Amino acid sequence: MIRKASAQWKGDLKSGKGTFSVDSGAFRDLPYSWTQRFEGTPGTNPEELIAAAHASCFSMAFSAELGKASLTPEWVKTSCTVTFEKTDKGFAVTESHLSAHAKVPKADKAAVEKAANDAKAGCPISRLLNTKVTLELKVET
């Protein structure tokens, strides 16, 4: 499986503007800029897309790990907070924090926690990121 996205940037770093698209067509020519990335102007940025990718990947991996334990979640909700900050080597993603909430009827809490930790370690986006990955889990049975 190969997935593709593309980006274009016009102008200098601080006053320029760019767009990115994904080949699936889910979005095309989505704008991004310095101010969206570093100054909080409304709009998206690469780090927000990484957070969305990590949250969605983890949710699927968690469901898969629960399935391995013969458990079926009613639902899994995950948010992800990516910390993007200046380091001695320049700007970097220094942490990706997953906050998951799952309803898994009739489940043993220890089995659900094991599945969540296995998903955190094994989801493809967790493995892709070269940063600290943390997890906060809330379980309803």
Image: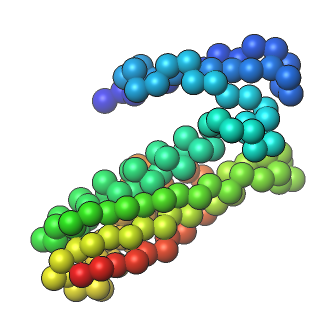
Asked which quadrant contains residue 15, the reply is top right
Query: Of residues 70 and 36, which is closer to you in this image?
Result: 36
Residue 11's spot in the image, x, y percent? 81, 14
* Residue at the far front in the pictured view: 42
Residue 102's spot in the image, x, y percent? 32, 70
Q: Is residue 58 left or right of residue 87?
A: left
* Residue at the far top in the pictured view: 10
Q: Is residue 141 left or right of residue 48?
A: left
Q: Quadrant of the N terminus?
A: top left
Query: Of residues 108 and 103, which is closer to you in this image?
Result: 103
Q: Residue at x 47, y 45 (%)?
A: 53
Can residue 131 be seen from the camera position used here?
no
Q: Residue at x 72, y 52 (%)?
A: 84
Q: Quadrant of the C terminus?
A: bottom left
Q: Residue at x 77, y 53 (%)?
A: 85
Q: Is residue 60 left or right of residue 126?
A: left
Residue 26's spot in the image, x, y percent? 40, 26
Where 1 sits versus 138, above or below? above
Can residue 132 be seen from the camera position used here?
yes
* Residue at the far left in the pictured view: 70
Where 75 sits versus 71, above or below? above
Asked which quadrant contains residue 123, the reply is bottom left
Colouring mode (rainbow / by chain / secondary structure / one colour): rainbow
Q: Residue at x 30, y 85 (%)?
A: 110
Asked which quadrant contains residue 67, the reply is bottom left
